[in-house]
């Protein structure tokens, strides 16, 4: 199954595949087992199921014989399985069950809404004794709210942090026998709740519905927030006093419920006000210089000196690259040894001197390898980096890190996002050392390697006291300074990765324009401080380009590399209609598996690309960084890739022979 990000989170969702042959049956009793396990310990839980409409809507139709297959014809069959789960939960003694229908935060056509109506009517009669809670989160229901209120459910939950307007809307629309769960505690962030603000929202619901019909809750699942602050021993007391992780959030929920019910000015409320005030006025957060600099950003700062056609000439005159230039995306294998050395250095078992000597050896070796194998634009290998966001966060002011702030990303894999708590600035150069060192080892151009502002924002916990755009512009200015430093230290090519650009897209299409505008501006702000001669690359690793390609063009990067091999260059369809102006390297090697693609396969992919993109615009590269690969397949695959590029050059020079 394909993996996609769950809404605008960094959690990976496995996408079920549907076809006219799909048949559903219950193969796991996990929800019932877990209910019973908790019950045996005296805890009655509300089992959470992905709602049937969300399940079908977020699946993918894969039916070669029947590509226009209507997924909603599967609903009846699917509902039989849900009914069986409900019956078993009822037998096990459950009172409540929760259905998550987060698609309600998206634009929907009639089919999923009709499916919801049918589904909950059916399930209601299948399990008449169970109480139903229907939830949505991550965004407003908007016009879906009226339909939701008509469903035969006992409790409706909305995300009051992202959609406070839903509270009033639902409070008016719900029937007398229905209750409203108000998600006032942000499950997607790490900041302490502002009690006064939350109580104001709750009051509106209370006024419209009466206290008995109002529930207090986190906005969404707490899987998107770290476990608890008690696992943090390094964070200083002041910072800690501004934060709330999952355990603290649960306390906030019960405190808020109490405050809402009693209306009393308790010590907890006063303490909360003091924490809000301390954060609002802290000098650690506010840096007037940074704010001033963002204020004074103008159009001219977000534009290269000359248009691409002109830049292309001067860059080519300087770099003198062949047709189908070859490069990689940045990292080379992070072997066990590399990771072990970094771990030892972090623990203090290895001196700075020894660690740097080790990094220098690795970098020298990877440059030599790239030179020998015949790549055209080299990279330094990223041996000094643990993670492409953490590395920069650690070097920027305004960021802090946790010891155990893990959130689930996929299966047993977790990520530990940095926390952006204050105005962002760059105290000193971050990457110049290793990039210039690498460049000093070769005559070929080495690409400087940076992470872009939108990706740094997207993969961090962000401030809730200023718009995301403002934080992104602050990061963009810090990256801009780094780009300029790399240029003045002799780097002729600089890549700014933006793999998270697409997952930052708002859930509603009406908001896309605005986001894409400022995201592109931030990228251009980061990349436009250099002269025409310096070649700016970017990289993105996903293959859905529909509705998006014009925004990629708006970045005005001289070269972009993208993931393409897994979809067999299918994404290049978008290029048929849209004349992408700049250079592009559609990945010809799927680096997500150890398989070594043959030269012929890569030639074939290049041929497909050349059918929709003029050959003068094409670059040859893997799909993504090689960090997770081992050396044997890296060596073999890169040799094939370079041979494929050579043969493509030959064919382009002698078109008669094709
Ligand atoms: N430069 C990064 C690397 O090669 C890019 C990683 C990514 O796209 N996720 O590792
Ligand atoms: Zn990538």
Image (tube, rainbow, N blue to C red):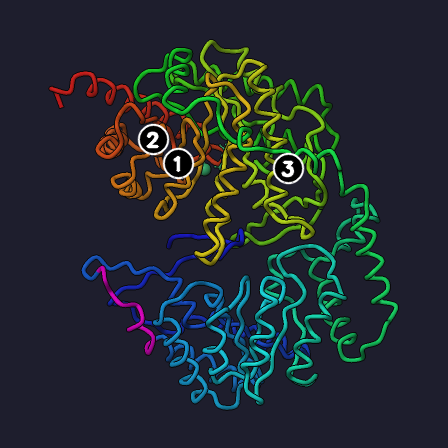
Q: What span is in magenta?
A: 67-77
In the rendered image, residue 464, in percent from the top left (x then y), is placed at: 67, 53
**Residue 70 falls within the magenta-colored stretch:** yes
Q: Which residue position is annotated with label 3?
A: 474
Using the rendered view, name the quadrant where residue 94 is placed. Answer: bottom right
In the rendered image, residue 473, in percent from the top left (x then y), is placed at: 60, 38
Say if 390 sits above or below 156 in the image: above
Q: Which numbered marker is on residue 37?
A: none
Magenta stretch, main secondary structure class: helix
Front-lying residue, 96 or 312: 312
Say few, some or many: other residues with alpha carbon within 10 Å of mark 2 (under 14 / 14 to 19 / 20 or more): some
In the rendered image, residue 391, in percent from the top left (x then y), is placed at: 62, 34
Say few, some or many: other residues with alpha carbon within 10 Å of mark 3 (under 14 / 14 to 19 / 20 or more): many
Q: Which residue position is annotated with label 1?
A: 553
Identify the mark nearer the N-term, 3 or 2: 3
Asked whether residue 331 is in view, the answer is no
Tell me the quadrant of the picture where the N terminus can be found.
bottom left
| Mark 1 close to ligand 2, CB under 8 Å | no
Say if 419 sits above or below 603 in the image: below
Tell me the quadrant of the picture where the C terminus can be found.
top left
Identify the mark nearer the N-term, 1 or 2: 1
Query: Pointers 1 and 2 in contact (CB under 8 A)?
Result: yes
């Amino acid at each position: 199954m394909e993996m996609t990000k769950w809404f605008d989170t960094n959690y990976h969702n496995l996408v079920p595949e549907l076809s006219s042959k799909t048949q559903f049956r219950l193969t796991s009793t996990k929800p019932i087992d877990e209910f019973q396990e908790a019950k045996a310990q005296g805890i009655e839980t509300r089992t959470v199921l992905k709602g049937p409409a969300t399940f079908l809507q977020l699946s993918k139709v894969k039916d070669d014989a029947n590509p226009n297959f209507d997924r909603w014809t599967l609903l009846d069959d699917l509902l039989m399985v849900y009914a069986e789960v409900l019956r078993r939960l009822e037998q096990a003694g459950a009172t409540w069950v929760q259905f998550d229908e987060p698609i309600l935060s998206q634009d929907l056509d009639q089919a999923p809404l009709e499916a919801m109506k049918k589904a909950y009517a059916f399930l209601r009669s299948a399990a008449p004794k169970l109480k139903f809670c229907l939830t949505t989160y991550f965004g407003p229901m908007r016009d879906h709210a009226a339909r939701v209120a008509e469903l035969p459910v006992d409790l409706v939950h909305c995300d009051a942090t992202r959609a406070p307007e839903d509270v009033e809307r639902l409070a008016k629309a719900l029937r007398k026998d229905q209750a409203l769960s108000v998600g006032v505690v942000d499950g997607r962030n790490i900041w302490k709740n502002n009690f006064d603000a939350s109580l104001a929202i709750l009051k509106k619901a209370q006024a419209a519905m009466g206290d008995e019909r109002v529930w207090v809750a986190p906005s969404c699942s707490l899987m998107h927030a770290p476990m608890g602050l008690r696992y943090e021993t390094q964070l200083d007391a002041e910072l800690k006093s501004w934060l709330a992780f999952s355990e603290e959030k649960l306390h906030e929920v019960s405190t808020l419920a109490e405050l809402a019910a009693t209306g009393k000015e308790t010590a907890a409320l006063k303490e909360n006000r003091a924490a809000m005030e301390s954060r609002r006025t802290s000098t650690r957060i506010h840096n007037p210089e940074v704010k001033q600099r963002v204020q004074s950003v103008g159009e001219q700062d977000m534009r290269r000196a000359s248009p691409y056609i002109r830049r292309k000439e001067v860059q080519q005159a300087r770099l003198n690259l062949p047709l189908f230039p070859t490069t990689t995306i940045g990292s080379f294998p992070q072997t066990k040894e590399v990771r072990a050395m970094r771990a030892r250095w972090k623990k203090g078992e290895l001196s700075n001197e020894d660690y740097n000597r080790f990094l220098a050896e690795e970098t020298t070796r990877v440059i030599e390898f790239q030179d020998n194998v015949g790549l055209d634009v080299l990279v330094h290998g990223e041996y000094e980096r643990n993670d492409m966001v953490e590395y920069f966060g650690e070097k920027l002011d305004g960021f802090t890190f946790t010891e155990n702030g893990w959130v689930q990303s996929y299966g047993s894999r977790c990520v530990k996002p940095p926390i952006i708590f204050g105005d962002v600035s760059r105290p000193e150069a971050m990457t110049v050392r290793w990039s210039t060192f690498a460049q000093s080892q070769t005559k070929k151009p080495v690409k400087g390697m940076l992470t872009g502002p939108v990706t740094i924002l997207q993969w961090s916990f962000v401030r809730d006291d200023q718009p995301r755009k403002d934080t992104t512009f602050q990061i963009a200015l810090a990256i801009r300074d780094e780009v300029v430093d790399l240029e003045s230290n002799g780097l002729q090519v600089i890549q700014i990765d933006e793999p998270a650009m697409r997952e930052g897209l708002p859930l509603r299409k009406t908001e896309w324009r605005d986001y894409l505008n400022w995201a592109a501006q931030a990228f251009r702000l980061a990349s436009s401080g250099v002269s025409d001669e310096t070649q700016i690359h970017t990289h993105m690793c996903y293959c859905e380009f529909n509705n998006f390609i014009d925004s990629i063009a708006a970045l005005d990067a001289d070269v972009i590399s993208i993931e393409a091999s897994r979809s067999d260059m299918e994404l290049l369809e978008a290029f048929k209609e849209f004349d992408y102006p700049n250079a592009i390297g559609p990945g010809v090697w799927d680096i997500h598996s150890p398989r070594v693609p043959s030269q012929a396969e890569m030639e074939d992919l290049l041929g497909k690309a050349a059918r929709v993109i003029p050959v003068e615009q094409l670059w040859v590269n893997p799909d993504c960084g090689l960090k997770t690969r081992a050396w044997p397949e890296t060596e073999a695959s890169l040799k094939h890739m370079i041979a494929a590029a050579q043969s493509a050059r030959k064919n382009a020079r002698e078109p008669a022979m094709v």
